[in-house]
Amino acid sequence: MGAGTVTTPEQASASARAGASFLVSPGCTPRLSAAMADTGLPFLPGVSTVSEALELLERGVNEMKFFPAEASGGAAFLKSLSSPLPQARFCPTGGVTVESAPSYLALPNVGCVGGSWLTPSSLIEAGDWDRVTELAREAAQL
């Protein structure tokens, strides 16, 4: 199990102490990136610009969360990065839907996608784990 929406260095270390096996952030400052790296855990720092991606690549990080994906240019934006930044790989989240996920997954620089369609709050509140499981199975087929 991982820890998501890590936004401070303190959250990164607390997540590691709590037993997280990976960390995910929506964005990444130099201080947050260093703190996540210091945990020794795999981490997926968030980016939404070319400059942010370049900064992480300079630090040796080539796997990144692209957030908020749809608001930041979507699949077209990531497609445009595949040539100048071939070493960068992305996990788009933020506005990704079951309908738009295949366009991301078709890109050479996308390894996976994330989307809240997998765990709608109405299903969580209702405790409908069977439907959540069904949605996860459907997503795995994408």
Image (spheres, helix red, strand yellow):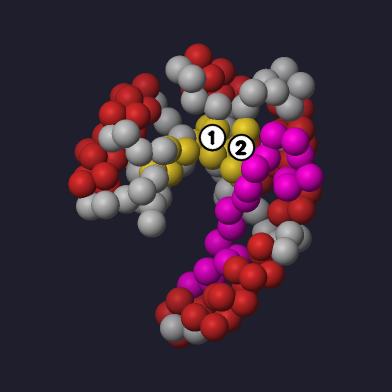
Residue at the spot 71% in from the left edge and 54% down from the top edge: 101
Q: Position of residue 29 (x, y in %)?
A: 39, 26
Estimate how packed mark 2 is, as few (under 14), some (14 to 19) or many (20 or more) residues with alpha carbons within 10 Å.
many
Residue at the spot 43% in from the left edge and 43% down from the top edge: 24
Q: Position of residue 1 (x, y in %)?
A: 38, 56
Q: Quadrant of residue 53?
A: top right
Kindly identify which residue carries mark 2. 90
Badge 2 vs badge 1, beta-carbon distance below 8 Å: yes
Residue at the spot 48% in from the left edge and 72% down from the top edge: 121
- Compare marks 2 and 1 and give the one earlier in the sequence: 1
Q: Amino acid at mark 2?
A: Phe
Q: Quadrant of residue 38?
A: top left
Residue at the spot 37% in from the left edge and 22% down from the top edge: 30
Q: Quadrant of residue 82?
A: top right
Residue 1 to residue 24: above or below: below
Residue 11 visible in this rendered orientation of the protein = no
Q: Horizontally, is 59 left or right of 90 in the view?
A: left
Q: Is residue 93 magenta?
A: no
Residue 122 to residue 26: above or below: below
Disc 2 is placed on an element classified as: strand
Q: Horizontally, is 40 left or right of 131 in the view?
A: left
Most common secondary structure along the magenta stretch: loop
Q: Which residues are magenta?
A: 104-121
Q: Position of residue 125 (x, y in %)?
A: 43, 80
Residue 129 to residue 15: above or below: below
Q: Amino acid at mark 1?
A: Met
Kindly identify which residue carries mark 1. 64
Q: Horizontally, is 35 left or right of 94 in the view?
A: left
How many labels, in total? 2
